[in-house]
Image (tube, rainbow, N blue to C red):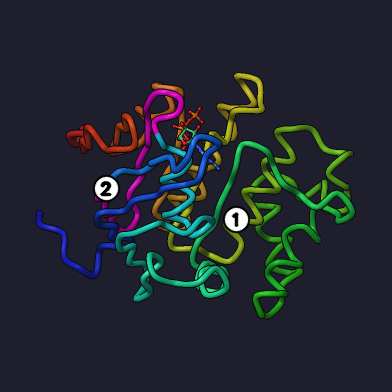
Amino acid sequence: MARSDTDIVIDAANVTLTLSGAAGPVEILKGVDISLGRGESVAILGPSGSGKSSLMAVLSGLERATSGNILIGGNNFGTMSEDELARARRGQIGIVLQAFHLLPTMTALENVAVPLELAGAANAFTRAEAELKAVGLGHRLTHYPSQLSGGEQQRVAIARATAPGPTLLFADEPTGNLDGSTGHEIVDLLFDRQAAQGTTLLMVTHDPEVAARCARIVEMRDGKIVSDKVKAAA
Ligand SMILES: Nc1ncnc2c1ncn2[C@@H]1O[C@H](COP(=O)(O)OP(=O)(O)OP(=O)(O)O)[C@@H](O)[C@H]1O
């Protein structure tokens, strides 16, 4: 079935990223085109240094693209200033990274609730508590990050990312700092939250088994997409 425009949540065209390195400018993304549909799960695979994290950073608005268009919910992330990007990201985009990036002086509950409150959400603490329960941490609300295991910290990071009900959930090597079985639980949880919220999930991974659980696999090499395959329905 053809996808209608309203089913597309991110449409990126001819995206480039050039950063200045010690020996001059380094072309990191060399004209990437990608569009993602509502509710899709997409894995990005590729060798180290191929530009996977950089692509995720520009698509999620963490980094400004050097050129190109990135259309998300009526905004062009490709042409916005850093401040505009930060505002546009809020509520619309959830990001989970390899390092959990929790604030050490805040409890699990505060780590989830405070960003919601800053974004102007009503009932931030009630919503944060519900989201922490949904990731299996209802019994750890008042623990600080240093009192939580790595897997528990990543669960808090997932709750923080999903609490605003984002359209897009980005995960960059979300299991990179975890042991095998904890990593599996975290991947299960990402798919669980994606299904519960109808979110589009874009995940960078080195793990072919994790990638195989996504409905679509995108492969990068040397700053470009070299393969983009949707799995046949089972
Ligand atoms: N701030 C920067 N300045 C210059 N070069 C950079 C910068 N950040 C990344 N790069 C380079 O851009 C290229 C792509 O990096 P990126 O982290 O996106 O790759 P990756 O595919 O995610 O790699 P990995 O799997 O190792 O995480 C690499 O060659 C990297 O050295």
Give the SS element for disc 2.
strand
Residue at 61%, 62% (x, y): give it. 163
Location of mark 2 (residue): 31
* 205 is higher (above) or lower (below) than 54: above
Q: Is residue 33 magenta?
A: yes
Residue at 19%, 68% (x, y): give it. 5
Decide which of 19, 174 is in the foreground and name it. 19
Which residue appears farthest toward the top when viewing the image? 180
| CA gap, disc 2 and disc 1 | 28 Å
Point out residue 103 in the picture as x, y percentages from the top left corner.
80, 52
Q: Which residues are magenta?
A: 31-50
> The disc labelled 1 sits on which kind of residue?
Ala
* 200 is higher (above) or lower (below) than 44: below
Badge nearest the viewer, 2 or 1:
2
- The C terminus, quarter of image: top left
Location of mark 1 (residue): 161
Please say if the residues under marks 2 and 1 sit with CB atoms less than 8 Å apart: no
Residue at 67%, 48% (x, y): give it. 157
Point out residue 115 in the picture as x, y percentages from the top left corner.
70, 66
